[in-house]
Amino acid sequence: MLNTLWTQRALIWAFANRDFKTRYRSSLLGWGWSLLQPLATLIVFAAVFSIVFRVKAPPLGNGQGTSYAAFLFTGIVTWNLFSSFLNLSMSQLKASGDLLKKVQFPGWAPVLGASIVQLVQVGLEIVVLAGLFLWKGNVSWTWILAVPILIGTALFAQGLGLMLAILNARFGDVQYIVTVALGALYFMTPILYPIDLVNQHGHILGWFVKLNPMSWYVQTMHDVMYSLVVPIWWVIPALLAAGLAVFWIGFVVFNRFSEDLGEYL
């Protein structure tokens, strides 16, 4: 797999470069839109859940009060990485259908190229998140641990995205099912609320949240960025290993069922 990816690196970058040039091409704000959407979501959700529903965030790692906005944005950044990779994988493969009918190339190349571009947006969101924590004085070396967590999240999402992309190429309803499922999964992930709140109310709901893989990625990001604590030693390696495993499975499945891909797109 790694040898194949390395061999096709120029093709992947060519698709990434194409997306760099076309994304927000006719927009005045350009890449500014990549930050406006998560910031707008942050403002609305922070107002609704912290003021109306009075959801309280855990104490900041520096011991100086709490910040629901910082807590929420940490979860949003992690979730956006996951959901955007899933949606882009399906849409980019569909968008490359005409080209795949004319030229023979790996169908996963445009998918990975689009993901590279998406990583730039995630990087911008991380910069804003870091600035928010710097303003709060909530800084620690544990931030470094966010890197393998985000890498694991990206690999996990990309693996699922590759499998969903090939499935969506054959059955167009998949993208609509995924949209509905992501909407439900969003509220089953501790983004809008701390995980302790679930543990206090309802054992069945708590198990659903704990069995959700994204709960582990989001909660671990909360630990290292917000609470400034180091998770149990096996958690981050396990998240990274799970991401690698799912990516490998997704890559294999995609290659296995993409022989007649052009006929379905």
Image (spheres, rainbow, N blue to C red):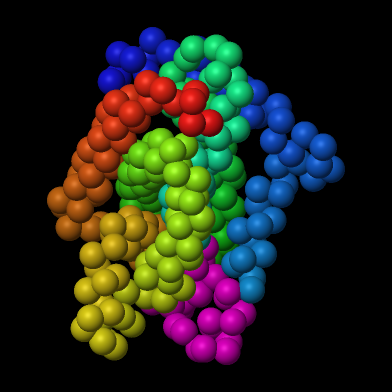
> Can you give x and y, in whole percent of width and height, for residue 224 in the image?
34, 57
> Can you give x and y, in whole percent of width and height, for residue 70 in the image?
51, 66
**Left or right of residue 117, residue 246 in this image:** left
On screen, 73 above or below 170?
A: below
> Can you give x and y, in whole percent of width and height, for residue 105 in the image?
47, 14
Q: In which quarter of the image is the N terminus?
A: top left
On screen, 66 above or below 186?
A: below
Is 52 magenta? The answer is yes
**For the image shown, how many numbered marks are present on the structure?**
0
Q: In which quarter of the image is residue 217?
A: bottom left
Instruction: Work out whether residue 82 can be spotted.
Output: yes
Is 118 magenta? The answer is no
> Can you give x and y, in whole percent of width and height, for residue 140 in the image?
38, 55
On screen, 81 above or below 25?
A: below
Q: Which residue is drawn at 32% across and 74% down?
A: 195
**Left or right of residue 104, residue 30 in this image:** right
Instruction: Work out whether residue 67 can be spotted.
Output: no
Q: Residue at x 24, y 68 (%)?
A: 210
Q: Which residue is drawn at 59% across and 20% down?
A: 99
Magenta segment: 45-74
Q: In which quarter of the image is residue 214?
A: bottom left
Q: Residue at x 20, y 53 (%)?
A: 235
Q: Residue furthest front?
A: 263
